[in-house]
Amino acid sequence: SAGGAVATQFDHRIIGIDPGAGIMKSTAKAMEDYKLTDWTLVEGSSTAMTAVLDKAIRNKEPIIVTGWTPHWMFTKYDLKYLDDPLKAYGDAEEIHTLARLGLKQDHPTAYTFLDRFNWSADEMGEIMVAVQGGQSPEQAVKAWVNQHADRIDEWTKGINKVQGDKLTLSYVAWDSEIASTTLLSYLLEDRLGFKVTSLQVEAGPMWTGVANGDVDATASAWLPLTHADYWAKYKDQVEDLGPNMTNVRTGLVVPAYVNNIQSIEDLNK
Ligand code: PBE
């Protein structure tokens, strides 16, 4: 055929993550937009994706993964995003905190704290890198909290503590969301007096839990594009507390040594 050398180089595979992740939908869309008809998006998990990436890098083999920032993989490896001239992965993504309807009335303390919470990719990165280096998320969060008293103070000052009220957060086992949810859970318990359950679920239930009121909040909504389908479905059944992080990104990622392609368009060569 005329094209296909690049597809052959990569064994026709883009290494994806869990099927409910927004980045899987964006990637399916990208494959249509860029007409990547003889490519396969491989489903798995973010843990499996990083394991496959690690192995490829050890062997200096070609690999393309679905990637996002913030993520420790950009600290550990020399990686690059492929250019996306058709903007299949959108622009200026943000991570939002969502509350269930009624949280403000039922748990004003949690509501105010969650509404205030916002941090930077670098701050989250400190926790992610520590976890990747072998610490448990709880250990990494405690160390982070000790080093960022000023931030904790901004988020919690003047808020009334509660006496063991129960609160439930939902999240998916994406490394970035493990970091944020562990931090929120720790602060809600240690500083504000809640008893928190963090439910690790798939992306669909993460959203439906907040929408149907089984879950009080999530800090893991990637908007406006990555979770656009979930937002369209549930926007009237959740309260958007706004971004807890701006300037996040998703896309297709390759090791820097993959130097014959710069753009998703090049995958057709
Ligand atoms: N992610 C990380 C998620 C949101 C957070 C980009 C893998 C997703 O694709 O839905």
Image (tube, rainbow, N blue to C red):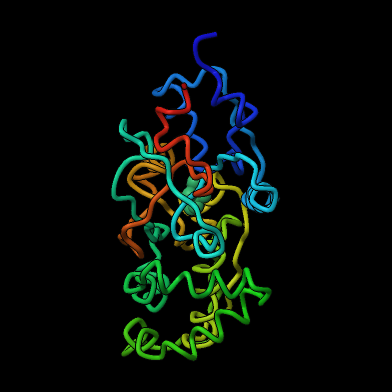
Please state the horizontal and vertical placement of residue 51, each as a whole percent of the image. 69, 52
Please state the horizontal and vertical placement of residue 224, each as a whole percent of the image. 32, 45
Whether residue 15 is situated above or below residue 266 in the rendered picture: below
Q: Quadrant of residue 266?
A: top left
Please state the horizontal and vertical placement of residue 210, each as a whole percent of the image. 48, 54
- How many numbered callouts? 0
Query: Who is closer to the viewer here, 175 or 190?
Result: 175
Residue 212 shows in the view? no
Residue visible at 54% across and 18% down in the picture: 4
Query: Who is closer to the viewer here, 69 or 215?
Result: 69
Q: Is residue 231 left or right of residue 179?
A: left
Q: Quadrant of residue 189?
A: bottom right
Query: Who is closer to the viewer here, 97 or 132?
Result: 132
Residue 245 shows in the view? yes
Residue visible at 63% across and 82% down in the picture: 139
Query: Who is closer to the viewer here, 33 or 166?
Result: 33
Please state the horizontal and vertical placement of residue 40, each as a whole percent of the image. 60, 26
Residue visible at 36% across and 42% down in the picture: 225
Q: Is residue 231 left or right of residue 145?
A: left
Whether residue 180 is situated above or below residue 92 in the rendered picture: below
Quadrant, the N terminus? top right
Whether residue 52 is situated above or below residue 187 in the rendered picture: above
Whether residue 247 is situated above or below residue 187 in the rendered picture: above
